[in-house]
Image (cartoon, rainbow, N blue to C red):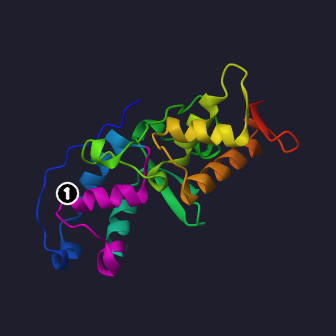
Amino acid sequence: MEYRSADLVLKEIPYKDFPSYDTEDIASRFRTVIEKEGPVVDDFLELKVLKSYSIFQRGSQIAPFLRKVLVSTGAVTTTQLDCDGNEHLVLWPESFRGLEMRLQALETGFYDDFRPSGKRDDMPEGTFRSIGDFPQIEVFNAMRQQLEDGKTLKKDELFTDTNHALGFLVKGRQIRETLEKVLKDGVANGTFVYSRRAGTVRLK
C-alpha cells in the first residue's frame, strides 16, 4: 500500500503572525491530511500543516497554539509511546470512529495495512516518514505479515525483514527500539509468541 499525500495549498504566513491566524483554516488543513493520510502521527501531521504556510519549525510560540487547534478538530485518536517514552497522538479518518480501543489494542481485522517509506530523495514530497513518523500499528502489521503462512523466525531475522518491509535498509537505535516495543506489545495482546530459549517468534 502506497502512502498518498494530501495536497495543501501553499500560503505564506509570517512566523510571528501565525498564533493569531484563522484557526478554522488551520483546522481544515488538519482534517484534510487526516482524512487522506490517516492514520498519521501528531508530529508529522503538525509539521506538514505548518509547511503549507511556509513555516518549517514549531518553536515555543507556535507549538501550544498548533496543538490546541489540532485537538479542537475532534478527530479520532489513539496514543502511542515512541522509543524514548514520549506519548504521541495518532489521528485517524472519521470512518474509524468507535474503533479506538480496538485499534489501540492492535487488534487485527480493523486496520491491517502498512505503507512503506523509502529513501528521502526517492519519495514524493510529503510522504517520507522516519520510523518515529509511523503509527506503530503499521509497524505491527508489517511484522505480523512476515510471520504469515506459519513461519517461525529468529527475532533478529524478523526485525530485519520487518525493517525492509517498512522501506528501511539499516536498523538504527530508534528502529530497533521501536521494533522491540512493537514485538512486546504484540506478545502482550496474544498475536505473537516469543520463545526466549530459542530466540524465535511466530504467530499464535
Residue 57 is inside the magenta segment: yes
Q: Which residue occupies the foreground of this view, 5 or 151?
A: 151
| Residue most extreme to the front | 170
Residue 108 appears in the picture as rendered: no
Q: Quadrant of residue 155?
A: top right
Q: Could you say where residue 71 lies in the image, as x and y percent from the top left?
A: 40, 61
Tell me where residue 133 appears, x and y as whole percent.
44, 53
Residue 189 picture location, percent across and down: 73, 42
Residue under the image location 30 percent in, 80 percent down:
61
Tell which residue pokes out farthest to the right in this image: 197
Can you say which quadrant of the picture contains the N terminus?
top left
Q: Main structural element of the magenta stretch: helix, strand or loop?
A: helix
Can you name the residue that lies furthest to the top here? 149
The quarter of the displayed image where residue 26 is located: bottom left
- In this orientation, which residue lies closer to the viewer: 80 or 66? 80
- Closest to the observer: 81 or 109? 81
Which residue corresponds to mark 1? 52
- The amino acid sitting under disc 1 is Ser
**Residue plotted at (11% across, 59% down):** 11
Q: Is residue 4 left or right of residue 140?
A: left
Q: Which span of residues is magenta-colored?
A: 39-63
